[in-house]
Image: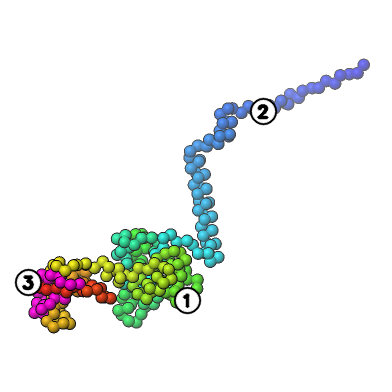
Amino acid sequence: MSKAKIVKKDKNSRTKTKKPVSDHSNKFVEGMRLPPKVVMQIADEVAKMVTQRMGRHEERRKEEGEEVHIENPVFLDTSALIDGRVFDLIRMGAFYGTFAIPEGVLSELKNIADSKDETKKERGRTAMRALEELKKQKVAKVVVVDDQDTLIPVDDALIKHAKKHKGRIITCDFNLAKKAQISGVTAVDMYEMANILKTTAIPGEEFYIKVIQKGKGERQGVGYLPDGTMIVIEDGEELIGKAVKVQVERVIQTEAGKIFFGKSLGE
């Protein structure tokens, strides 16, 4: 007769059973319903990672010589910076966009600021200060553009940049403006712009001016409107030093701008 084996249970042994997961825990895991504070922390970390990666990508692009796109670029040349009026027009909002300055232009400006000629030096340094002030005020975005080809003249590099980025050029250099226009680039000549903005008049209109000098013609006197428009007064030589009322008789257009010719109506 076979003996049945009797299995003794160890007093210390216990049957392990899995603890049932509550419905709330299932929903928490399945729905990933994290506390708002934790979600914000995760979002901040992700944003930092993305920003760092973008920064590294931008650095790689610069190292590889890949040119960064400039949004609505306006290229300033040395003459426009030295002239200075462009800074006031930018602050007024007359010009807008990203103001780009090629390295060659910046080098020219620095050379003028270091000139032995005191007048040139002062104008160069004034332009440098105005440029730095524009950056600090954050009225407009200002960027310096790398000149990859340093062998070509500064004006040609300026046109090349403007054409590549589909931008405009602001200058006081008549030859540069014309050369840019021939190349299919929009160029604003500050002197031409100033002439366009000068006072317009038709025969019969009247102005008060001060006669300040003798004219080229016999017995002529000359005065100027506040915008610089010249008025030549017939028989006005004897009125030099006096403020008189002048009636315009004719208007002549010259390369330098408009000249008004008129007669005095008395003080």
- SS for tag 1? loop
- SS for tag 2? loop
Residue in view at x 59 percent, y 27 percent: 22
Mark found first going from the N terminus, 3 or 1: 1
Q: Count residues near mark 1 (Cα–Cα under 10 Å), then give few for <14, some for 14-19, many for 20+.
A: few
Residue in view at x 37 percent, y 68 percent: 187
Residue 59 falls left or right of residue 11? left
Identify the residue under disc 3.
266
Residue 28 falls left or right of residue 111? right
Q: CA distance from mark 2 to mark 3?
A: 113 Å
The spot of residue 62 in percent (x, y) is 52, 64
Mark found first going from the N terminus, 1 or 2: 2
Residue in view at x 23 percent, y 72 percent: 258
Q: Is residue 152 visible?
A: yes
Rendering quarter of residue 75: bottom left
Tag 1 near tag 2, CB within 8 Å? no
Identify the residue under disc 1.
152
Q: CA distance from mark 1 to mark 2?
A: 80 Å
Tell me the quarter of the image containing the N terminus: top right
Q: CA distance from mark 3 to mark 1?
A: 59 Å
Which segment is the magenta one?
232-251
Rendering quarter of residue 53: bottom right
Identify the residue under disc 2.
18
The spot of residue 184 in percent (x, y) is 43, 68
Give amino acid for label 3.
Gly
Seen as rendered, the residue at the extreme right is: 1
Overall secondary structure of the magenta section:
strand
Give amino acid for label 1.
Ile
Q: Count residues near mark 2 (Cα–Cα under 10 Å), then give few for <14, some for 14-19, many for 20+.
A: few
Give 194 or 133, whichever is nearer the viewer: 194
Is residue 240 on the magenta stretch? Answer: yes
